[in-house]
Amino acid sequence: MHHFPKLLSSQIGFDVAQTMLEGFEHHYRVFREAAARETSLRSR
């Protein structure tokens, strides 16, 4: 079992992870908005 290091050893690695997380959050928000629109259209 690998343990996550207590201190990050690479700023680049952290930046990559942060960018991936921001991209996921953006696309998840877009998906949720589209799903909400679809739900409201179907309930009319």
Image: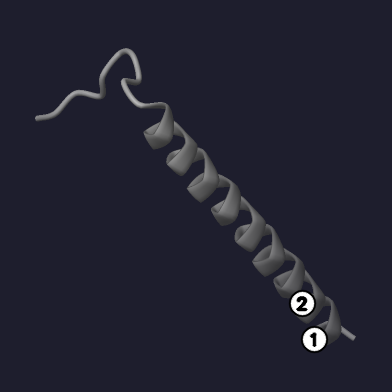
Residue at 44%, 41% (x, y): give it: 17
* 14 relative position to 34: left or right: left
Q: Nearer the viewer, residue 12 or 37?
A: 12
Q: Which residue is mark 2?
A: 39
Tag 2: amino acid: Thr
Residue at 53%, 46% (x, y): give it: 19
Q: Position of residue 13 (x, y in %)?
A: 38, 35
Q: Residues within 10 Å of mark 1 (few under 14, many from 20)?
A: few
Q: Where, quadrant-wise, is the N terminus in this rendering?
A: top left
Residue 3 occupies which quadrant of the picture?
top left
* 21 relative position to 8: left or right: right
Tag 1: amino acid: Arg
Residue 11 occupies which quadrant of the picture?
top left
Q: CA distance from mark 1 to mark 2?
A: 5 Å
* 28 relative position to 39: left or right: left
Q: Which residue is mark 1?
A: 42
Q: Position of residue 43 (x, y in %)?
A: 84, 82
Q: Are marks 1 and 2 in contact (CB under 8 Å)?
A: yes
Residue at 62%, 62% (x, y): give it: 27
Q: Considering the numbered disc 2 on the image, is that residue within a helix, a strand or a loop?
A: helix
Q: Is residue 28 above or below residue 18?
A: below
Q: Position of residue 26 (x, y in %)?
A: 66, 56
* 22 relative position to 5: left or right: right
